[in-house]
Image: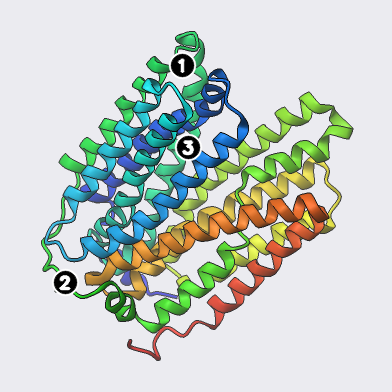
Amino acid sequence: MKTPSQFNQTRWLNRTVLGIGLASLFSDWSHEIATTLLPAYLASMGLAAAWLGLIEGVSDGLSSFAKMASGFYTDRLPRRKPIAVAGYLITALGTAAFGIATNAWQVLAARATAWLGRGVRTPVRKALLAGSVSREAYGRAFGFERMMDTLGAVVGPATALALLAAVNHNYPVLFALTLIPGLIAAGLIAFVVKEKERAPVPHISFGEKLRALPVRFRRFLVAVGLFGAGDFAHSMLILLAAQKLTPELGATKAASTAVGLYVLHNVLYATFAFVSGWLADHFEKRRLLAAAYALAAVMALMIIVSPMSVWTLALVFIFGGIHVAAEEALEDSFCAELVDESHHGMAFGTLATVNGIGDFISSAVVGLLWSAFGVQIAFAYSALLFALGSFMICRLKLHSETS
């Protein structure tokens, strides 16, 4: 545990932390409106559900690899901020472009463009955030950013539903309106965020850059990758709740209850993102992250062994909201601590890519296991990987290696 003098050394909520946090809120607000409307928009065009999966899959894959490339490239630049501004602008314009699409390929192109911008900006934003505070404040800075991002995810769907009624399902107008929060986000990065002067890293090849990352960081990535391979999308919890509650409540009430539980999940997600960051600045990040991974294992085990009542499911959603908040805030702040600031872009890009690959693997595998063998086998797979990830984080040595 750190001494009181250590966590009072810096004023962590500076203009850069505040600007990045607000930008995350407005940008997430923008694209969550679009994400909420997208299934209905595709349905209005007469497109099958398979198109939605293809659009999301291609976009997520492109975003993941853009994060790696952006992290590698931006470490070489004396100023990273222009890349972040460009990324936010591309996301805003790509999202608004949904409204002028007339077929599935155009929607795919618009979504892929938006997510390309999102991928480019992510490691840059994280590097700017880490560079704006001292090491003792990493947890609070990243926790604050995650909290603001999650608030955008709460406000976005609510705004979409309100706008849908207000403009009588006029999709071009609805998607055009996403430009307002999207451009505000880009403006906040451009005019509020202040980038600290830095010396660019001399150019080396991509492979050399990867090898230059510390051994302890690469071991951290292995643990993150193992955990991520089981870390299914929490929208699956909505499906689980709807299925398990239908015999007792009926299909309509079960569906509404499941959505209500997901709102509870997101409220806890937003709240505990900052709480987790605060704890990370006061206690050892490694143990806190291991505990967050272990909580995910407890959540999965509850699904396997507990009777699925409303109250049991409420606990599952509560644990889910808390663990994902802690996981995201702690992974980012721990990453910043493990790697020298001059390599933060590459480190955050690599971490984001590992998480992106994990997201793709986990939801696909859990979904297939659920369909083929049932809920118990599917979530046992996740519980095992969550426990392995927690064990590996606990075993991570922080000070014995220097390379």
* Number of marks in the rendered image: 3
Q: CA distance from mark 3 to mark 2?
A: 35 Å
Are there few (<14), some (14-19), or many (20+) residues within 10 Å of tag 1? some
Q: Quadrant of the N terminus?
A: bottom left
Q: Which mark is residue 163?
A: 1
Please name the amino acid that badge 1 sits on: Leu
Q: Nearer the viewer, residue 141 or 172?
A: 172
Residue 45 appears left or right of 129: right
Q: Nearer the viewer, residue 262 or 95?
A: 95
Q: Quadrant of the C terminus?
A: bottom left
Query: Which residue is labeled 3 in the image?
Result: 153
Q: Nearer the viewer, mark 1 or mark 2?
A: 2
Residue 89 appears left or right of 377: left
Please name the amino acid that badge 2 sits on: Val
Query: Which residue is labeled 2 in the image?
Result: 201
Q: CA distance from mark 1 to mark 2?
A: 47 Å
The quadrant in which residue 170 appears is top left
Q: CA distance from mark 1 to mark 3?
A: 16 Å
Q: Position of residue 37 (x, y in %)?
A: 51, 25
Are there few (<14), some (14-19), or many (20+) residues within 10 Å of tag 2? some
Is residue 238 visible in the rendered image? The answer is yes
Residue 71 appears left or right of 350: left
N-terminal-most mark, 1 or 2: 1
Q: Position of residue 3 (x, y in %)?
A: 37, 74
| Residue at the (44%, 32%) spot, across then down | 105
Q: Position of residue 259 (x, y in %)?
A: 66, 33
Q: Determine contact: label 1, label 2, CB under 8 Å.
A: no
The quadrant in which residue 195 appears is bottom left
Secondary structure found at label 1: helix
N-terminal-most mark, 1 or 3: 3
